[in-house]
Amino acid sequence: MALTKDDILKGLSDLGVTEGMIVMAHSSLSALGEVEGGADTLIEVLAEAVGPTGTLCMPAMSGERPFRVESSPSNVGIVTERFRSWPGVVRSIHPTHSVSCLGPKSEQIIAGHIDQPTALGPESPWGRIAQMDNGYILLLGCDQDRSTLLHCAEEAVDAPYLTDIQPEYVDADGQVKTKVLHKFPGPHRDFIGLDSLFREAGIMKTGKIGRAVCRLMNAGETLELAVAALHRDPAAVLCNNPNCGDCVKQRAAIARTRLSCEDFTLSAVADELAVPLSGLVDGLPLLGGQAVDTIELGPALSAALIAAGDAELSGIGRTLEAAGAKVAMVSCPVDTSPIADSVRNAAAVATALGARLVKLPPLSPDMSERVARIPELVRETAQSGVSLVVENQQGTVCDTKEKCEEFLAINPGVGLAFNPAGFAHVGEHPFLKTFYKGRLKQYIVQLYITDGCHPDGEPYVLPGQGNGEVKELMSILRCRGFDGYFCLKMGDRTGKEAFARHAKAFWHLMATL
């Protein structure tokens, strides 16, 4: 049976809509079921429910560019499209978030909307309604994802993922203008996740009108709770779906803001995501999703780039630059080439790609001739602005604290890429003894976020789950204003899923520091 005007009026009354309210209504006519008179009936009932002293508002957003207040159709439902041309309705000039209003507060609500620097600030229609004691949000057959007010909360906390846009509109004089809008919200949100928050706080009443589940919320209290949620968790309105590109990108923006307060630079070993060379660029979006814009080229990728011609190397450099990616370190290939050739080749790639660090190949105790060449190579590479780095690795001349200290003391100018798992593998306590009680701290240019266990345990585990004392090392280096690299390195794991788990563990540690 079709809903009548009286059916809808009773449903609104039961929900709590009363005369004198200022109501911003978001609606889905089809969700109500069959309605006698369709959209016109719903508009009449809503206007009657708030009465002559109340004001009925609806979104009137349009995708048409340039936006024309008189003719651009509303693209947020048939009810809003019908309402914008309803007798007595006024509509705000705004290219992205136009609003239609009917009632005594209409002009106050929409006045100067186009003059605001943002679309959804305190002086936008939604912001003004939230400041009114009797301002409400009404959701008729739609959920919190349709509640534009919640974007105001993102703007209020200056969410890091908000951007600037420049849409066009036609002004009151008929001139096409470009409006710069700051702090503009992005495409996808998980506002649905806030529904339980409003319900548990008791600020939202829920009921059914016809088939539609409807919600009525005090706008000011709703906005206050949403702002508080975003202060607790900047990603509170972003989903956790790893395949949602929008939210992955926006979470990365939050992470970059977090990193902007740090002295260190976050990097990752590209080889663990992208081998062969053709896959290097393909791995950049995954890295960017974790706020990693700096990479280390491991032995395999470095070897591929050394073998590539100058034209291909230049092309890779341009591609990385266009993607906003930087190279911090180039590793010498693990081969039998003379160490001078290996270092010089890696240094040439580093110079071409703007890197300033070259990591020496693993040096076993029987490679005395290679070790003897290092002081000469330090001086040679320094002339081109490149510094040499050694990583502590089991079975090399730098596998323990004492051996590292000895090696670095006789090779001034060589930095240390401190690998906590490497020291754990030889039974050391990387923070309590290796770092804290030794002289290595003065040589560290990079901390690998790599965890592992003592000799009888798992070689590699997620950061914070082994004997590498990774969290302690991260914390103490931050206390020292460490301006080198925290490099995500997995050890014996590779691939997208493994990297995602590794990065998640790192960010968990960051959240607990």
Image (spheres, rainbow, N blue to C red):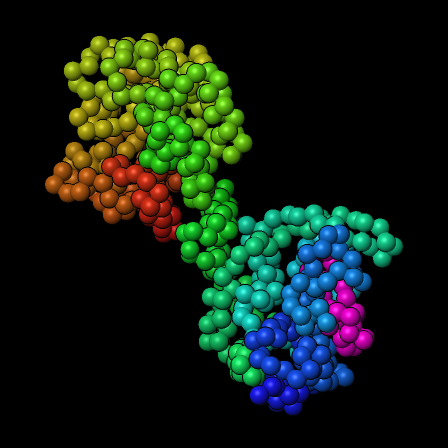
Rendering coords of residue 507 (x, y %): 38, 48
Rendered position, 323 above or below 304: below
Q: Say whether residue 209 is visible.
A: yes
Q: Quadrant of residue 485?
A: top left
Answer left or right for 1 relative to 238: right
Foreground residue among 12 and 164: 12
> Residue 307 colored magenta?
no
* Residue 104 falls inside the magenta stretch: yes
Q: Residue at x 24, y 22 (%)?
A: 362
Residue that extends furthest to the left in the rendered view of this protein: 456
Pick the residue in front: 366 or 411: 366
Q: Residue at x 80, y 62 (%)?
A: 70
Above or below for 172 versus 368: below
Image-quadrant location for residue 359: top left
Q: Quadrant of the N terminus?
A: bottom right
Please tell me which residue is depicted at 27% across the width and 21% down the height of the picture. 334
Residue at image point 17% right, 18% down: 365
| Residue 26 screen position, x and y as percent | 62, 71
Who is closer to the viewer here, 371 or 300? 300
User: Which portion, as a residue range, is magenta?
Assistant: 83-108
Q: Is residue 245 above or below residue 407?
A: below
Residue ranking furthest to the front: 1
